[in-house]
Image (cartoon, helix red, strand yellow):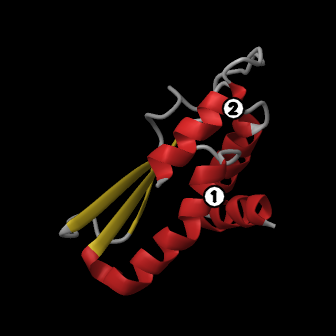
């Protein structure tokens, strides 16, 4: 479902010129830093490369919350920033999330940015 949504999103904007975006100030986009919620040695480990302007990523957010509630300590979720070139505000969302992360509030900002997208 997510791959189909991402493909549709990519197809829809494929003909539009891409806006120039800057790199995140904190390392290579999509690599570091990573944010982990749950035990490091959980038997189920999910890693998301996300973009806060991506519709499928935001639609995945409630599914992820349910999985975390269902699996509890058996699930570890890792999030890495991966702002897509066609989303001109995605780097700003990533920077805001990383700034919150430096204050120990990454997951709160993660939730807020996805909920704002869904509203």
Quarter where residue 83 is shown: top right
Disc assigned to residue 69: none
The foreground one among 23 and 27 is 23
Whether residue 42 appears in this view of the structure is: yes
99 vs 3, left or right, is: right
Relative image position of residue 51 (x, y in whole percent): 61, 43
Relative image position of residue 46 (x, y in whole percent): 33, 58
Few, some or many residues within 10 Å of mark 2 (<14, 14–19, 20+): few
Question: Is the residue under label 2 in contact with that under label 1 (CB below 8 Å)?
Answer: no
Q: Residue at x 65, y 45 (%)?
A: 54
Q: Is residue 88 above or below residue 117?
A: above
Relative image position of residue 12 (x, y in whole percent): 69, 32
Question: CA–CA distance between discs 1 and 2?
Answer: 17 Å
- Which residue carries the number 2 mark? 12
Q: Residue at x 40, y 76 (%)?
A: 67
- Image label count: 2
Q: Quadrant of the C terminus?
A: bottom right
Q: Is residue 13 above or below residue 71?
A: above
Whether residue 25 appears in this view of the structure is: no
Few, some or many residues within 10 Å of mark 1 (<14, 14–19, 20+): many
Relative image position of residue 76 (x, y in whole percent): 33, 66
63 vs 40, left or right, is: right
Disc number lying in front (1 or 2): 2
84 vs 35, left or right, is: right
- Which residue carries the number 1 mark? 58
Tell which circle, 1 or 2, labels the residue nearer the N-terminal end: 2
The local secondary structure at tag 1 comes to helix
The local secondary structure at tag 2 comes to helix
28 vs 47, left or right, is: right
Q: Residue at x 79, y 62 (%)?
A: 116
Q: Is residue 98 above or below residue 68?
A: above
């Amino acid at each position: 479902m997510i791959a189909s949504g991402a493909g549709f999103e990519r197809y829809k904007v494929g003909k539009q010129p891409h806006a120039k975006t800057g790199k995140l100030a904190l390392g290579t986009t999509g690599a570091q830093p990573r944010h982990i919620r749950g035990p490091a040695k959980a038997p189920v480990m999910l890693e998301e490369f996300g973009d806060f302007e991506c519709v499928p990523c935001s639609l995945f957010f409630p599914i992820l919350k349910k999985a975390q509630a269902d699996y509890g300590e058996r699930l570890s979720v890792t999030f890495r920033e991966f702002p897509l070139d066609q989303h001109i505000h995605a780097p700003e969302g990533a920077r805001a999330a990383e700034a919150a992360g430096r204050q120990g509030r990454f997951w709160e900002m993660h939730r807020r940015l996805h909920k704002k997208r869904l509203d």
